[in-house]
Structure formats: C-alpha cells, structure tokens
Amino acid sequence: MIQIKLPFIHLKTNAFSYVIHITQVEKIEHVYFGKPLIDDDFKPLLFKPTAGVGSAILYDRNGQNLNLDFFPSEYSEFGKGDFRLTPLELHMPDGSFVTDFVYHSHEIQKGIYPSNDLPIGKENDSVESLILTLKDTKYDLYLKLIYTLYEDSDVLGRRAILVNNDETVHIRKLMSMMVDFVDCDYDLLSLQGGWIKESHKEITPLQRGTLLLESTTGASSNRVNPGFILMKKGTHEDFGSCYGFNLIYSGNHYEAIQVSNHGMTRVMSGIHPQAFHYELAKGQSFETPEAILTFSALGLNTLSNQFHHFIHEHITPRQFKGLLRPVVINSWEAFFFDFNESKLVSLAKKAKKLGVELFVLDDGWFGNRNDDTSSLGDYTVNLKKLKGGLKRLSDTIHKLGLKFGLWFEPEMISEKSVLYQTHPDWVVKVDGRTPSLGRNQWVLDLTNGEVRNYILKSMKQILNETLIDYIKWDMNRHITDAYSKHVKHPGMFYHEYIKGLYAILKDLTETYPNLWIESCSSGGNRFDLGMLSYTPYVWASDNTDPIERLKIQGGLSYFYPLSTISAHVSLSPHAQTIRTTPLSTRFNVAAMGCLGYELNLKYVTKAEQTEIKHQIELYKIYREVFQQGHFYRFNSPRKDLTLFQVSHNQTHILGFYQNGYDASPNTDVIQVKNLKPNQTYSIESVQQTMPIQQFGHLIAHAIPIKLNPNGYLMHKIGQYKRLNNATESYVVSGAALMQGIPVIQQFSGTYYNEQTRLLGDFGSQIYIIKEVGETHA
Ligand code: DGJ
C-alpha cells in the first residue's frame, strides 16, 4: 500500500515500511526502511539538524540549516555539500558536474510504470507505483524516481529515469537506487567467485570507507553477483534484521556500500559507471535497470523466501510460472565434441529407461565444430556427425518419448567460420587492433541491428524446421575491445549490447512462448534477474561436484529459488576437482534444484543405473516440493555439515550433507523448520545404496566369502550389486521435530550391521517429512 500524507509518503507491506519525506527546502529525505510501522507520525524519525559547525557546508535555499553531508537522502547528487559517493554524475550544459534536484511532483498509479527496453518486474494485482519527479533548479531536466511496490512479495522496486527538456546533458553515472542508513553496524553478505566456484557466500563486516561489488566483464559475472544483503550484527538464518538488494540486469553492475566519516551507511546499485557515457539531447530520456529491495526482521531465510516469491511471481516468464522443470540428460560431459547420431540415440535410450524426460544436445552439432576453435555463428548441422540431420535426430528422440533440446551460443563468432569470412565487421573490436580471444572466440556486436536479425533468423530457421522443446543459451567469454560504430559514444556500448541481447530474447520468447530456455555463461557467469526475466532457469556452474555445488547452490539460494537453479549429476571422480563422491550425494545435492544427468551412461554400472532410476522416481514424486517449495538453510551445528530444507504444502524435505566423516562421531540431531507444533509428522530417510568396493578389504567382515578387494570378482559383483544403507522412520510431533531428534548413529569404527548409518566422507541423506493423522489436542 502506498499512503500519501504530505510531506510524507509511506510504502508499506506486511514485512516493511519505507518512508520518504519532502522537506521544506524540497530536498527528498529518506526517513525509514525497516519493520512495518503502525503509526504514521513520522516526525520523530526525521533528521534533526542543528547549527552547522566546523567544516560543514550548508545547503542555502530558503536559509534552512541543512548540511547535506549528514542528510539521509533518497537520491543524492554532486556539488551541493554531500561529499559521500554520489549515485548521479551529470556533465551539465554549463560545463560543470553540479546539479540540484528538488521535489517537483508525485503520482501514484496502480500497476507498473512501463519500461521501454529493459526487463522489469511483471505486474499482478498487488502492484502499485509511485513516481516521484524531481527537477533541477537551473535546467529543464527531470529525475523521475520510480518506486514499484510488489506488495505480495514484500519487495520494493526502484529505478530512475532522467528526462531532458533542455540543452544536451552527458550522463557519467546514474544509479538505479540509493538508500541511506543512519547507522553502520552491519555485515555485508555477498556472492563472490569465479569460473567453477561461483556464488560463494562471503560475509564482510562494514567499516569506514567503501566496499564495492562490481562487474566490468560485460556480464553480471561469476566474480560477484549483483545480489547482496546488509544484516544487523548478530543476524543469522532465522533471526535478525536484514536488507536484501538485487538488480534486474545482466551487464556491468556496481554496488557500493559506503560508511561515511560520521558513521552513516550509504548503499547504491546500478549500471557500472566505468566506460559508461550517454549523451542526452533535448527531448530524450534515459532509464536505469530496476533495483530490488526487501527487508526481513526474521532473519535470512525469510528474506530469501521474499526474493524467491518475487521471482516466481514477477520475474519468471508467465508461461513457466509454477511449471515443473523436466528431468534432463545433457550430452556435454557425456561426449564433449566427440559424438555421432548413434552415440546420442544410445544415450537417449538408456536415459529414457531411467526416467529422464528431456534430451539435450549440447555443443558440437554444427559447422566443423570438433573442438572450441571453430564454427560459432554457423548454425548449419554437421552432417558428418548427424547423418540424418537435426530433424531426424529430433524425431527419433521424440519417438523415444523424450523432449528434445539444443545448444546455441548466439552471441559469439569464431574466426574459423563462414560468418566471419562474410561479415568480419560484425565482431566487437576497435579498428586497427586485433581483438583479444576468450575460449578461442570473439563477441558479435549486438548493438548492430543486422547482427541481431542474423541471430534471430538463423535460430528461427532451425526452430521452424525441427521440433525443439528447449534451448540452452550459452555465452562463454567476457567482453573486451568494447567498441562499435553503431553506438553514438563508446560509453554506450556495454549497455546497448545488453539491450540488444534483451531485444533478441524478447523476440524469441514472444515467437516461441513455450520454448524452454536455459541460460548459461560458462556455467554461472550470468546468473541474474535480467536473464531470468526471459529464461526460466540458469545453469549454475560447470562444476557439478556436489561438495562444490553445496557452496554454489547454497550461495545462490539467498537470492534465487530452486526452480531457477539447474543442477546435474555427473561422474565421479569429478572432472574438475578429482574428488570421489557417492552417487547418492550427487543426487541429493542436484535434487535441490532442477535435476538433470550429465554423464555417459555407458560408464554407469547396472547397479548404479538402478539407483539413478530410483532417484528420478523419487524426484518426480516430490518435484513440486523441490522446485516450488520454501527453501531454508540452517545454522549448522557442525562446521563441515550443510543442512537444507525445502517445504511445500504438507511435505518437507531435509538434506543432510557432511564433508568429512569424524572418527567416533557425535550423535546427529536433525531439526525441521516451520512445522505445526501440535501436528504429528512421519519422517523417513530415503533408501540409498553404496558400492561394495567402498568397504575395501573390510568386505570380508560383511559377507561370508573371502574376496580380493581389488580382484575381478569383487569388481564384477560391484557392477550388479550395491549395499543398502540403513533407513529409519519415525512418527513424531512437530514440536519434537522442530526441537530436533537424534537419528541413528553413524558407523563408529568397530561394528557394522544393516542398521548402521554409513555415510563416510561426502556422505549425505535425504529425509522426507509429512503431516499425518490428527492434531494433538
Ligand atoms: C559451457 C557450458 O557451461 C557447458 O555446460 C557446455 O555447454 C559448454 N559451454 C559447451 O561448450
């Protein structure tokens, strides 16, 4: 709800209040962001200036005693006495950087204030917008601050639009939002990383000075995600006040958290100002991407679930809202570039028997692409590999009862390609300089309309000729040599590139509304709300090692729901970490996302295939819980233990993941969150198996015959037989489960029977919890 009682504007949801004040000197004051306020007497919350002292500068309109350097502002600027970081830097017609924006007008409207060419939150009945317009005191230049209240999700969207009715202005920096806090006792939670280590949670205490989260790679990047959280000291998963921020944008981004010399915290987020420059002539306007803000007084899990709700309701393409993601088999880690039709069909047949629903043909199907040095841009099928063409393959796959998916890397070009021979000028580069290579490829200039048309035309030709249910949209390098003669100023390049990308995605998704698109950028190099506005999910990382994935998926879960996180089971030892992990753990982690398999089933034993079949059966039964449920992290009782919970309606699923096995381990106590204390629940662990070889020479103690642990017989038996791990089940009250119940002991070194829980290093277990019976009186 947006309430106006001038001079105050109150934006309110069930989780927070956000209060704005139009001061007497018409500067806009940020009054409050936090727990919902019941009272609307906001005067005691106002900034209380006294006489300016020492080096203070006074903002002198109407003789008011206002020192902007202390003033909690809705959107600060340069040149009138606020010496903190500015969200706005304009080179003005008078040659200066000085601006002075003051209140001009405001308006409330039902629904969304539209955007011309950027993705913003999608509308539903709960949405209301405030348009607060400021005007420069010298020029006919307007700054529209757009506040979109997504009340059902407890989220506030913010963006800025600069409208010029005067002489030309040059924009050097224009942030989507800024929030001033009067205090600074916060920790910053951010997602840091790189290739195959994306989105690792990092907690940094604020201190005087500026912390920057930034990407200048041309993408939102695997270095640092645009999502971040400020939390009051002492906040944890289920306790404390925290503020969440994100940006609906896929390009260079900049988030600054600055603690001033007077202990106030300023937060801003938007397009990175590096190499950014827009010329705004009379009659033109520029709009920023939308930033997303939310607040929870109940800890990080609640905050995350607000973000998740927002994504389900307002970001995910409408036609995919609530739609359950199919179980995938992907050809990449199975074959890389080395495949032919019969290998693919054989993989598909095996996968179908195990319950897989969608077959994805990854890289290598077009041109002469037998490695990563050629053919990007030439999407003509390689008939040496696929003798019957794509259509025959797609038909065969569909006849098997599977859906068919295809990989593209539309934004890229290889030097060895017909496209490059024909259009060398379509590469992003500076005349007279050889552009730098990344994965042996260059970037296509998406600011050029001809390039965009070519991409759409070549993709549509394939999509029209062949039945394709899904595409994987990959993008495997950062952008360098950023320049194009198709933009007026080089400072426009990166942003116009992203707008070009969105224009292509918009066209494609409008033409093929039911086409599933999974976005990917060397894994999670572009995991952001911009891509998610067009593609329902993202390949989270090229790293499928489950122990690494716990960090990656756990990190992403702070901002993104499991329905957006694509996660596959691959072979062990893992290709990137050489770590050996149980098949059960690989599944137990991938199930906390959109499940797929990415391995050559030829190298999977019969016994493992049976286990995979059971995994997929289980996943399908609980798919809605996994993909649409509320997600919770735990403050783990053990250093190397991760616990996740996902809950939907009356079903709860708990994932227990240990890194290392402790000799003579403590009793494990498991807790389940958000149950009804007086309700009875059943809790059952999922049956999983272990390879016989895991026991090595100890197998002699488990079976009556003596076998050479490294011998042929043991190996042969292992292909067909795996050992059941202990299962357990209880019926217990919600109160007891929320408090925590002990589960059966793990193997403790001397004794083993079928009732021993044997998890070992990297072992894990999934528990299913359901409501049963009557509530206790
Ligand atoms: C990078 C992706 O992350 C992989 O999954 C795979 O699609 C390769 N690209 C193909 O080149």
Image (cartoon, grey):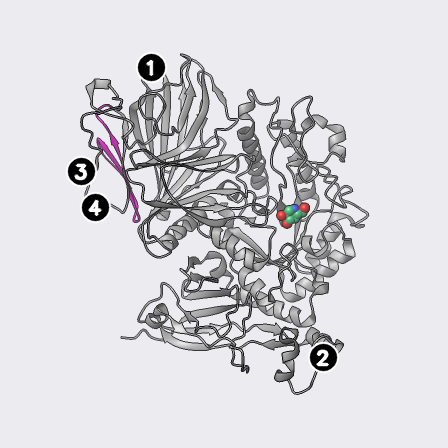
Given this view, does label 2 or label 3 mark the residue nearer the observer? Answer: 2
Mark sitting earlier along the chain (4/2):
4
Determine whether the beta carbon of the residue marked 3 sits less than 8 angstroms from the nearest atom of ligand 1: no
In this rendering, the answer to whether 736 lies above or below 365 is: below
Residue 38's label in the rendered image is 4
Can residue 361 be seen here? The reply is yes
Give the magenta part as a residue range: 2-25
Callout 4–callout 2 Cβ contact below 8 Å: no
Mark sitting earlier along the chain (2/3):
3
Which residue is disc 2 drawn over? 708
Given this view, does label 4 or label 2 mark the residue nearer the observer? Answer: 2
What secondary structure predominates along the stretch shown in magenta?
Answer: strand
Q: Who is closer to the viewer here, 685 or 142?
A: 685
Determine whether the beta carbon of the residue marked 4 sits less than 8 angstroms from the nearest atom of ligand 1: no
Callout 1–callout 3 Cβ contact below 8 Å: no
Given this view, does label 3 or label 4 mark the residue nearer the observer? Answer: 3
